[in-house]
Image (tube, helix red, strand yellow):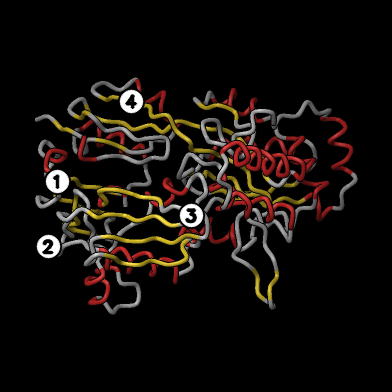
Amino acid sequence: MPQVAKSWDKLENEDAIIFTLRDDVLFHNGKKLTAQDVKFSFERAKEKGNDEYAIIKSIETLENDTKVKLKLQALPIFVYELIAKYKILSKESLEKDQTHNQLEGLKIGSGPYQLIYEDSFNKIIKLGLFDKYFNKDKIKNSQKEILFKVNSNYDTSLLQLEEGTVDAILDFPINKINNASNKKNIEVVQNKGAKCIVLFINNNKVKKEKRELIAQTLNIEKIIADLNLPVNPLKTFVPQGEIGHNENIQYAYDSNQNEVKNKVSLLSEKDKEIKLGASFKEIKEVVHKIKEQLQEVGFEVIVNIPESLTFFTNSKNGKYDISFMSNMNEMPYGHKVLIDYMNPIFEKEGKQTPKSHSHIQGDTTLKKLLDETQTITDKNIYEQTVKDIQTHLYTNKYVIPFYQQDIYFLTSKKVQGLTCDPFTRTDFTQVKVSK
């Protein structure tokens, strides 16, 4: 949204913002982007129940579709960061595409690169530079084409990079970085990241006593040291660098393991069982260390590591007792990741609110705090509220933070400018590949 607007003006005495649009922005189909496209895009997302658009009350087009008035429920301190994430779709393209998922219509954007080719079977996407992009200076030295290929075997990708058949690998696993850094003609690009690895607990299945025993059992710093992982222990769910990070929480236990063993021995055979799920993309050695430590105190652990989509479906549907997974923070305000992952479930008119990996049941205190973060305008109050949420999570042992990691790219010596911000956003117009 910010790239297509010349100005953002907050209205006095009203929770509303007026955007004046640029007059030189074209979609990839050559059609001009207008306020009608903005209105259509926001209303469509709101109708589909997208949480990020719930703050919008109404959208109005002004002055011959050159301006948009966005009336909001409130103007919280993060409102500009939130709106900056909103995507503008082509109204004409979506209305022409009457298929169920409207994939063809959704392919029409207005960014510096446009889709040229897609092979879903071989997982290949080819983008081409959009020569009618409004910011000509930005793209004058950009790559004409970029080819992306999804490959779940990072060893194969590394070999291809060494051979020169690919130029870069994005989000390379941290447990393989030491090996990759020893390869000739390969550059390791370390990007400061807000990527967090956590152990979600199914709070519907696992009661607090058992949650506490699991938390007291796990020696996360030992796992990190044993595997020589280039990460920082994560003490709380909102990581360092995020607004609202609670530096006073130290999610580590100086527990008496013999005492833990005694307590576990008193559990029923059923309560001693733990179903541990993890995505195929996570570090399997860490998963096995978790299993080892839990079994050392008397738990019986069954591990399931399916491909990513199956894992996420299983986790949200409550198939696991604990789920080991990464979560990406999308913005510098800490409430967003909390709402995405820690929203409690409530029964309403015989139906449940959307499921999350935490499966927290009917916690009105947590829900109230999460709702408050959506409307706070004062930064100090916002930060304290987000900190209070983390204290609540810690007290109830709803989740066990593991570690925070940077994001690693591998490139050939020919590649310059391939980086990302802490939220994995990459500006591919700045990437150069020498011949």
State which mark lies toward you, 1 or 4: 1
Cα separation between marks 1 and 3: 48 Å
The tag earlier along the polypeptide, 1 or 3, is 3
The residue under label 3 is 13
Q: Is residue 168 above or below residue 370?
A: above
Amino acid type, label 1: Glu
Residue in the image at 80% along x and 47% along y: 210
Closest to the camera, between mark 1 and mark 3, is: 3
Q: Nearer the viewer, residue 302 or 82?
A: 82
First of labels 1, 4 by sequence position: 1
Q: What kind of residue is marked 2?
A: Gly
Gap between marks 1 and 2 measured at Cα: 19 Å
Residue to which mark 4 is pinned? 188
> Mark 1 highlights which residue?
145
Q: Are marks 1 and 3 in contact (CB under 8 Å)?
A: no
Q: Within 10 Å of the Cα at label 1, are there few (<14), some (14-19), or many (20+) other Cα atoms?
A: some
On the rendered structure, is 70 left or right of 97? right
Labelled pair 1, 4 in contact (Cβ < 8 Å): no
